[in-house]
Image (cartoon, rainbow, N blue to C red):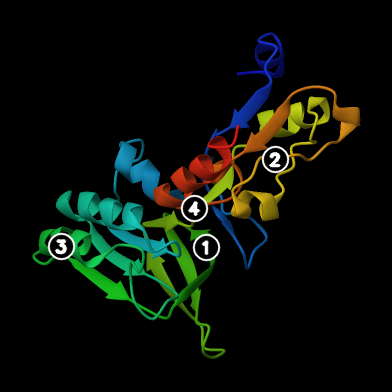
Amino acid sequence: AETEHVTALNPDVVIIATGGVPNTELFEQHQEQKHVITSWDIISGDVKPAGKILIYDESGDHPALQAAELAASAGSRVEIMTPDRTFSPDVMAMNLVPYMRALQDKDVTFTVTRRLTGVERKGNQLTATIGTDYSDHTYEVTVDQVVMNYGTMPLDDLYFALKPLSSNGGAIDYDRLIDGVPQDSVRNNGRGFQLFRIGDAVSARNTHAAIYDALRLMKDI
């Protein structure tokens, strides 16, 4: 949808739930990594798994393991790496078991307490620089493909386009949200529609949190 599509409906309230797009901007580099792909590229089939793959999982949720299972089943040699002390902390035990069962007979290793800090192309391969939060130790690994599971960036162009037209400036009063009472923020002299955004359109979060966002907001509208 574009701004004119929304305003043509003359709405009283607009909820932006446009989600996000996979993030490939490493914190250490302050820019998108042009040589990496995302878990969703593997899951969707848009990119074919290469021979030797590093899956860097900073989100700790399902897509990294899903990508690992698909790649390993296709014959790839896979290393799943996380900066955390344990892998996939957001995947609960009962959900983790099927992933582990599927990966046990395949060429998959798990590496914890290691952080991806950069990726460079050297010839036909990629060199990944690896660090750790616990010391200054660094090293390099050479792979055919680097896959990032690094959360999402808000898909928020429509929200910011509508913000100046809204009666509340797109703001949520979080104290009122937590208290479970209607939103009453007024900007722009109260002209226009109320505008809110929820879920990944604000920042990366899991499905349960996004649903809770919607419930707490919409029950009072």
Q: Where on the picture, by quarter, is residue 159? A: top right
Q: Residue at x 74, y 34 (%)?
A: 160
What residue would you read off at disc 4?
205
- The residue that disc 3 covers is 103
User: Residue sitting at 62 percent across and 64 percent down?
Assistant: 27
| Residue nearest the viewer, comparing 100 with 72 | 100
Q: Nearer the viewer, mark 3 or mark 4?
A: 4
Please tell me whether mark 2 or mark 4 is closer to you in this view: 2
Spatial separation of the CA atoms under disc 2 and disc 1: 45 Å
| Disc 1 crowd, CA 10 A, few/some/many (<14, 14-19, 20+) | many
Residue at horizontal 11 percent and vertical 67 percent from the top: 104
Q: Nearer the viewer, residue 165 or 42?
A: 165
- Dot 4: element: loop
* Residue holding disc 1: 119
Label 3 and label 4: CA atoms lie apart by 26 Å
Residue 129 at x, y = what percent? 50, 72
x and y, in percent, of residue 75 in the image:
17, 53
Q: Which residue type does callout 4 highlight?
A: Arg
Q: Is residue 100 left or right of residue 38?
A: left
Residue that mark 2 sits on: 183
Secondary structure under the numbered disc 2 in the rendered image = loop
Q: Mark 2 against mark 3, which lies toward the viewer?
A: 2
Q: Mark 4 or mark 1, which has the lower sequence index?
A: 1
The mark lying in front, picked from 3 and 1, is 3
Task: Kindly indicate whether the residue at mark 4 contacts the one at mark 2 (C-beta within 8 angstroms).
Answer: no
Horizontal side of 30 relative to 145 (left or right) equals: right
Cα–Cα gap, marks 4 and 1: 26 Å
Q: Is residue 129 left or right of residue 190?
A: left
Number of dots carrying numbers: 4
